[in-house]
Image (tube, rainbow, N blue to C red):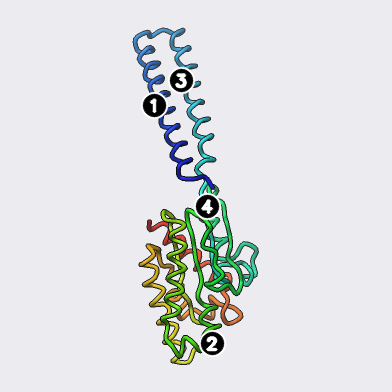
Amino acid sequence: MTTATGVEQATSSFDARFLCINSAYSNAKTSYDANANVDVYSKQLLSLNTIAKSLTDFRMSTTTHKQRTYLALGDSMSIDQYTGVKGGGAVSQFYRMLGDSWKLDDRSSDMNRMRYVPTDAHGDVITVTIGGNDLIADLQRYLDEGPESFAQEHLALLQSIRQTNPGAIFIVGNVYAPQSPLPELMLRSLDAANDAIADNIQAAGALLADIRGSFQGNEREYLCYDIEPSHKGATVIASLFYDAYRSV
């Protein structure tokens, strides 16, 4: 990925070239206004065309220096696998929404947990969907102890990602409920975990993708295999990512 310094240098070089070209354009136009004859006009027109081509070529040469990286981190809420559509996962759909000037570094994976999320990767936009598998794997501990240990591990993860990427647009999803109704105690635990996620997002200077709120009441339509996003559910998640991205 191009560093910020590289982008700044390319931009500075472009600005200097633009000023030079703009000055040449002004001089050519002044010369034409003062010497209104066909020969001079033809020469000035050729000069201006050359200038315009030079400006266009230079703009294209600097575009490659401005390519940005979308870093995707997280679990099966992000992946294509359960959607039944190639490129149908939330990450794939959001990546297409970003456009051709982006490249994708997709490190999301099925069954991922907070402890396995890499924190040394770099991106200009970062999405994270994590926590659901931790709540399942350590359910009894969270029911017995409350959400504090979950909240602390989640916060440490977000802070570490933010430290590596201080200038990134950082979008974090919360955790939805499955299709199967949860017992009241488990539902309260999920709500407490999502409250902690919201607090952590604010502390890390990130943006919330409220997947829980969007899926609530729509689990039959947005989920498959009880707990995995369907293609329609992945589309909703991608739209939440994009809305958060556009809000900046």
**Residue 115, position in %: x, y?**
54, 72
Give SS at disc 2.
loop
Residue type, mark 2 in image? Ser
- The residue carrying pointer 1 sits among few (fewer than 14), some (14 to 19) or many (20 or more) residues within 10 Å by Cα, namely few
Pointer 4 with pointer 1, Cβ within 8 A: no
Q: Identify the secondary structure beneath mark 3.
A: helix
Q: Quadrant of the C terminus?
A: bottom left
The residue singled out by tag 4 in the image is 69
* Vertical order, 68 against 87 (above or below): above
Which residue lies at the image location 60% right of the left edge and 68% below the top edge?
109
Image coordinates for residue 224, horizontal then vertical, percent: 59, 78
Identify the amino acid type marked 4: Thr
Badge 4: residue crowd in 10 Å (few <14, some 14–19, many ≥20):
many
Where is mark 2, residue-wise?
180
Q: CA distance from mark 1 to mark 2?
A: 64 Å
Residue beneath the point at 41% across and 23% down: 20
Q: Is residue 184 above or below residue 108?
A: below
Q: Secondary structure at mark 4?
A: strand
